[in-house]
Image: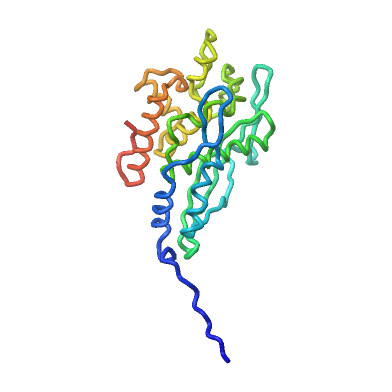
C-alpha cells in the first residue's frame, strides 16, 4: 500500500517578514528579571544571560536566528596590521583594552534571503588579560544593543554600577586616556571625595554607550563632549548626573532615528 506523503506544516509565522517577527519578539520582551547583585549596594542588575532569557524563546517561537559574521579592528599599525587590543598603564597597574566593530546578521529562518545586518562598535577593558577584555567588550556591546533593539525595560537601577572598575586606575593619566577613545575627556576629580561621591560619576561602560549613540547619529566623540559642555556646563562628561545622562542619550537616540528617516541629524 502506497503511503501518502505528508506536506510540511506551515506556521502562520513562516509567512511573516523579519521586521514583523521583530515586532512580535519586542512585545514579549518588555522587561527582564535581574539576577545579579552588587556587593556595595542593595540593588540588582542584569547581565547578558538575563537579557537573552526572554529573547531566546521568542526567537525560537517566531523563527528568527542571528550570528556574528564579522569582527573588524578599528585601529591598525603603520604597516596596516590589525590592532584588536592594547595595554594601558597607570598608577602601577595595567589593563587590556579591546576594540573592534562587530557585524551581526539577523535571519528569517523561514526565508533565509530575508536578513538584516548591523555593525556595532565593541570596546571594553579588563585587567585579567586580552581575552577577558574581549569578553567584556562583546558582553556590554551586545547587552546594550539588545536592550535598545527590543525596547527592554532595564528598570531604575544602573546595570553598570560597580562593573569593570579596572579602568578607574587609569583616569588620572592623560597619556593613557589618549589611547582609549571610549574614555575621551574623562578625568578623576581633584581633591579626593568620599567613596560614595565617586560612585556618582558615570562609569566607563556608560560613557562608551553614550559615545556609541553619538556615533550612530554622525556625531564624533569630541563633538559629543563639546555638546555636553555647552548644554550642561560639564567639563568632564563623566560628571553628568544620571538625569542629564538619560536626557542626552534620549536626544541622541532621537537624532539617530531622524537620520535613518532622512531628517535632522543633530541631537538637541
- Which residue is at a point 69% across and 31% down the rendered structure image? 128
- In-front residue for pair 233/108: 108
Q: Residue at x 60, y 23 (%)?
A: 176
x and y percent of residue 235 in the render? 43, 17
Quadrant in which the C terminus appears:
top left
**Colour convention of the picture:** rainbow
Q: Nearer the viewer, residue 119 or 207?
A: 207
The residue most toward the bottom is 1
Q: Which quadrant is home to the N terminus?
A: bottom right
Residue 152, image x and y in percent?
Answer: 43, 42
Above or below, 18 relative to 174 = below
Percent across and percent down for residue 135 are 62, 39
From the viewer's perspective, tell me whether residue 43 is left or right of residue 242: right
Q: Residue shown at 61%/38% (left/top)?
A: 76
86 left or right, relative to 65: right
Residue at the spot 48% in from the left edge and 72% down from the top edge: 9
- Residue at the outermost top position: 191
Which is nearer the eye, 188 or 219?
Answer: 188
Residue 75 sits above or below residue 118 on the image: above
Q: Quadrant of residue 10?
A: bottom left
Q: Examine the rendered structure and indicate whether residue 113 appears above or below residue 82.
A: below
Total marks placed: 0
The quarter of the displayed image where residue 253 is located? top left
- x and y percentages locating residue 221 in the rendered image: 46, 30
Amino acid at each position: 500500500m502506497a503511503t501518502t506523503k505528508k506536506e510540511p506544516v506551515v506556521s502562520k509565522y513562516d509567512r511573516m517578514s523579519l521586521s514583523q517577527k521583530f515586532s512580535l519578539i519586542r512585545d514579549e520582551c518588555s522587561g527582564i528579571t535581574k539576577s545579579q547583585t552588587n556587593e556595595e549596594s542593595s540593588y540588582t542588575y542584569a547581565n547578558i544571560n538575563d537579557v537573552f532569557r526572554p529573547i531566546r524563546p521568542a526567537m525560537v517561537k517566531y523563527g528568527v536566528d542571528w550570528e556574528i559574521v564579522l569582527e573588524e579592528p578599528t585601529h591598525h599599525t603603520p604597516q596596516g596590521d590589525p590592532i584588536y587590543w592594547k595595554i594601558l598603564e597607570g598608577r602601577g597597574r595595567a589593563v587590556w583594552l579591546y576594540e573592534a566593530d562587530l557585524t551581526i546578521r539577523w535571519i528569517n529562518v523561514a526565508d533565509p534571503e530575508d536578513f538584516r545586518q548591523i555593525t556595532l562598535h565593541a570596546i571594553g577593558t579588563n585587567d585579567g588579560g586580552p581575552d577577558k577584555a574581549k569578553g567584556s567588550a562583546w558582553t556590554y556591546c551586545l547587552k546594550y544593543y539588545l536592550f535598545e533593539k527590543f525596547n527592554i525595560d532595564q528598570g531604575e537601577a544602573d546595570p553598570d554600577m560597580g562593573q569593570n572598575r579596572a579602568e578607574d586606575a587609569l583616569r588620572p593619566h592623560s597619556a593613557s586616556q589618549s589611547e582609549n577613545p571610549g574614555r575621551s575627556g574623562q578625568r578623576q576629580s581633584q581633591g579626593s571625595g568620599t567613596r560614595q561621591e565617586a560612585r556618582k560619576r558615570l562609569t566607563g561602560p556608560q560613557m562608551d554607550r553614550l559615545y556609541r549613540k553619538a556615533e550612530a547619529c554622525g556625531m564624533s566623540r569630541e563633538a559629543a563632549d563639546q555638546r555636553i559642555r555647552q548644554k550642561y556646563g560639564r567639563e568632564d562628561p563623566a560628571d553628568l548626573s544620571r538625569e542629564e545622562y538619560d536626557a542626552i542619550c534620549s536626544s541622541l537616540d532621537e537624532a539617530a532615528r531622524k537620520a535613518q528617516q532622512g531628517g535632522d541629524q543633530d541631537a538637541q
